[in-house]
Image (spheres, rainbow, N blue to C red):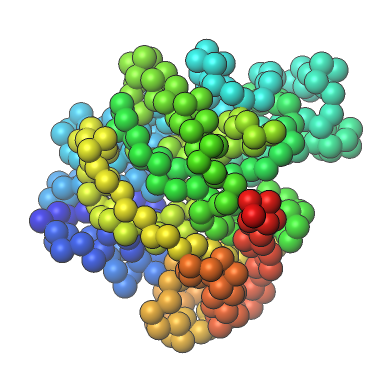
Amino acid sequence: MYNILVLGSGGREHAIAWSIYNDKRINKLFCAPGNAGTISISENIDLNIMNNDDIYLFVKQNNIDLIIVGPEQPLENGIVDFFEEKNIKIFGPSQYASQLETSKLFARNMMEKYNIPQPAFFECTSEEEILSVKGKLGLPLVLKADGLAAGKGVIICNNDNDLHNAIDDMINNRKFGRASAKVSVEECLRGEELSVFAICDGENYKIINSAQDHKRAYDNDKGPNTGGMGAYSPTPLFTDNLRKKVEEKILKPILDAMKNESYPFKGFLYVGLMIDEEEPYVIEFNVRLGDPEAQVLLPLIKSSVLDMIIASIDGNIENHTIELDSNYAVTVVLSAKGYPEKYNKGMKIKGLNNIQDKIVFHAGTKLENNDFLTNGGRVLNVVGIDENLKQSIFKAYELANIIDFKDKYFRSDIGMKAFKYLEEKE
């Protein structure tokens, strides 16, 4: 019997807890700090997930057998190394291996060293250096804060005005703080974006599924970058031919690279790709499940998610079989108006008692006096699942309209771009 601690408070962590809580081998499930949704399936614990000593004290007092790390910040903080040294099972990559996400330039340099396909890039620390790259590559350019910026530290510059605004944000005004002390200035590839998710054990991997995220705040991919406004899985873009290329040119080489550097990669690996003329290029790596991609990936796994995680920790993923549902899953993010900039909190959420057995993952929510209240920019993730993509989209939006709160906002086009790819395949 396992006592398990899930770290994090978003929709991803609610999805992780939801995906394992029915496992009969679980004695006690905790979420730290969790949200108003995780309360119904686990015990929420008020812990600072960036304080390894505090977490260790809780782990010892509650006989925790397994820690599952949801977000990237504790990984950057070395939580996996900390608990591995104490012989406590923990799922996720080491601090060094986490740099594949926590430092864009670390990842770019690693890919350059091991010939993994990616856009041309330059490391810059000043306005002069960035303008010099413009002279070499021309426009458009992509500017990426080197460090963690909550999914918002990427700016696409189509013209000089965009570029000067991006330089102000990154360099002059330090909008992203220390994250943009260094900037990766990159060639802007044109094509279709998709994400591929694998679970790794340091040597081997298994692909979980593919997905497409919708990063921009508004319909038709307009507006500022966000943490993600919705996603669907799988994407018809991820053909058998593309899968082979991703495995041979990216997944196997990056795992071999990390092993060769003496820091084998364990945990979830999220490969963000641009497909240009049927060739995959790495836009970014993430070292955990995406949010909101986790909310469509995990409901499609029919086999035990807990077994999959333990196989990764134990170095046995090669012998583990992941059984997937053949359906489509679509999630729509219900956000607070104004996100990702300024938005209000504390609005009462109505309609959650009308959803019965439907899948709704909480993100920025809290429970006060038996009322669900908004407590973040991305509030809830509604999920529709069906063998037919159109129906899965319909089910997600049906749920989106049942739930209500003041200043609710969501995109109306999540999953729609998939139809273009389906028509191309026919």
- Which residue is most to the bottom? 354
Q: Position of residue 177 (x, y in %)?
A: 62, 35
Please give left or right for residue 166 compared with residue 313 in the image: right
Looking at the rendered structure, the number of numbered marks drawn on it comes to: 0
Position above or below: 322 against 413? above
- Which one is nearer the viewer's eye here, 172 or 290? 290
Q: Position of residue 324 (x, y in %)?
A: 36, 55
Q: Position of residue 352 (x, y in %)?
A: 47, 81
Position above or below: 197 against 11? above
Q: Quadrant of residue 401?
A: bottom right
Instruction: Quarter of the image for the N terminus: give it.
Output: bottom left
Q: Quadrant of residue 325?
A: bottom left
Instruction: Quarter of the image for the C terminus: give it.
Output: bottom right
Please give left or right for residue 257 compared with residue 283 in the image: left
- Which residue is most to the front? 426
- Which residue is most to the left? 1
Residue depicted at 47% across the width and 59% down the height? 296
Q: Position of residue 195 (x, y in %)?
A: 54, 43
> Do we see residue 247 in this rendering?
yes
Residue depicted at 73% across the width and 50% down the height? 224
Please give left or right for residue 65 compared with residue 128 in the image: left
Position above or below: 89 against 391? above
Residue depicted at 54% across the width and 21% down the height? 116
> Do we see residue 283 in this rendering?
no
- Which one is nearer the viewer's eye here, 326 or 81? 326
Residue depicted at 33% across the width and 63% down the height? 18
